[in-house]
Image (spheres, grey):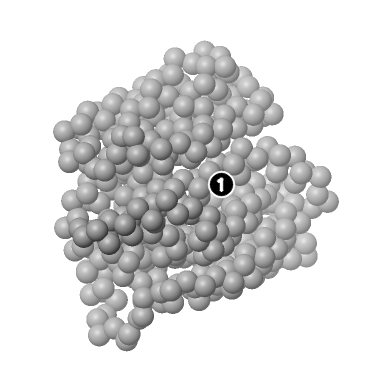
Amino acid sequence: MNSNAVSATIDEKTKSIWRSVPFVILLSNGLLLSIGNKIYELVLPLMMYEVTHSSVAMGTMRTAELLPNLLFAILIGVIVDRMNKKLWALSMIGIQAVLLMAMSLLAMAHIHFVWVYYGLGFMLMTFNYGYFNTQVSLIKLSVPACQLTSANAKFSFIESMIGIMGPVFTGLLFLLARFSDGILIASFMYLISFFLIRMLNIIEPVHGKSDFSMLDELKEGWTAFRKNSILYKTTMVTILLNSSFVVVSTTVIYFAKDHLHLDNSLLAILFSCAGIGGLASSLVANKFRSMFGLGKVLGISAIINGVSYFMMFLADSGALLAAALLIHGFATALNSVSVYTIRHEQTPTHLIGRITGITGTLFRVGMPFTMFASGFVIAWQGAPVVFISAAILNGVVFLSFLKSSLWGLE
């Protein structure tokens, strides 16, 4: 590397990320969409119950929302790599705003065809992932590579902050005359976001007419993914860690209510501890990388989460569970920032949509199986068995990580 290149790299590192107007717009947009998503996430189960008076309908609605990521993530990734990303982002946000408004108006008009709500929920999450995929691409285009850890940490900070504010949003939503008004508020958040993204000015790679089919482009993305050992190994590790994470996240709610007999208000406060841990992690993630290297941060996050699961196994009081959730939130945010940064740094710009789609699908591929199995484990052996199993899995992953090339990743 010549002296001019070294000087340019140093200048990029010392330049504040806040001086990047496109990044500030993306981050502000992320805040608006996070608030809108949180409102939607809180209101929808309540609105569905109000419409149907059926807990089965609530569960089915949530299932309909989970399917798009598994079914369409890879296809969306191929499309995003072909499209103008700003126009794609505007389309995804605009369509979601319209769908949310339609859902709210249907509820206000007392139209109670449940399948209509299932369809709207399915489409909402499809377009939601469509935006998320292009956001990953836009972040990569908005900041230099040396600032990607900082950029991902700031998005993680927003996610954690909104998570902490969940109980506040819940209280405010109960003040509304109708739960459908909450969906309407969410749609206005998306409308504001739409106009904010219109202000985005970012230089995108020029897309000529492709001579390849979508299947050929998907194969190109898959080949690049398989050849990149760092990205491939990170994905395999994430599959295992996400499988334990999703089970624990669900099981801990049952454990807190059935074993510790905590009421809903205390439960909300308790889970805010995870958000506080996430906030703290987002603030120190960039510094941790500078101190230890990205690979070690990812590996350490796995063992820290394993410790938090073991604390849940031992928990016999709300205080110990709160401490476990605080550590869990810290480690989970650290893991997310590390994984997203590795994906950003290891992926060429022209492949970012496809790689995001492929890895996004694989990250979640183990979740349905572990979720299904955990129900039987809880019924037969109790929630603590889930916690100790997850702790052991994270410990094994960490030990294998020590011998992996990922451990030395800077």
Q: Pick the residue in front: 286 or 383.
A: 286
Is residue 319 positioned above or below 51 on the image? above
Q: Residue furthest right?
A: 177
Residue in the image at 36% along x and 80% along y: 206
- Image position of 379 (left or right of 9): right
Residue 390 on image: x %, y %: 35, 28
Residue in the image at 31% along x and 41% along y: 294
Residue 282 on image: x %, y %: 48, 40
Q: Quadrant of residue 384?
A: top left
Is residue 182 positioned above or below 383 on the image? below
Q: Which residue is mark 1?
A: 158
Residue 382 on image: x %, y %: 44, 22
Q: Amino acid at mark 1?
A: Ile
Q: Residue furthest front?
A: 3
Q: Pick the residue in front: 5 or 382.
A: 5
Residue in the image at 34% along x and 34% along y: 291
- Image position of 264 (left or right of 22): right
Q: Quadrant of the N terminus?
A: bottom left
Q: Rate crowding at label 1 as few (under 14), some (14 to 19) or many (20 or more) other CA atoms within 10 Å.
A: many
Q: Pick the residue in front: 114 or 339.
A: 339
- Image position of 46 (left or right of 213): right
Q: Quadrant of residue 108?
A: bottom right
Residue in the image at 27% along x and 61% along y: 5
Q: Indicate the secondary structure of the residue bearing disc 1.
A: helix
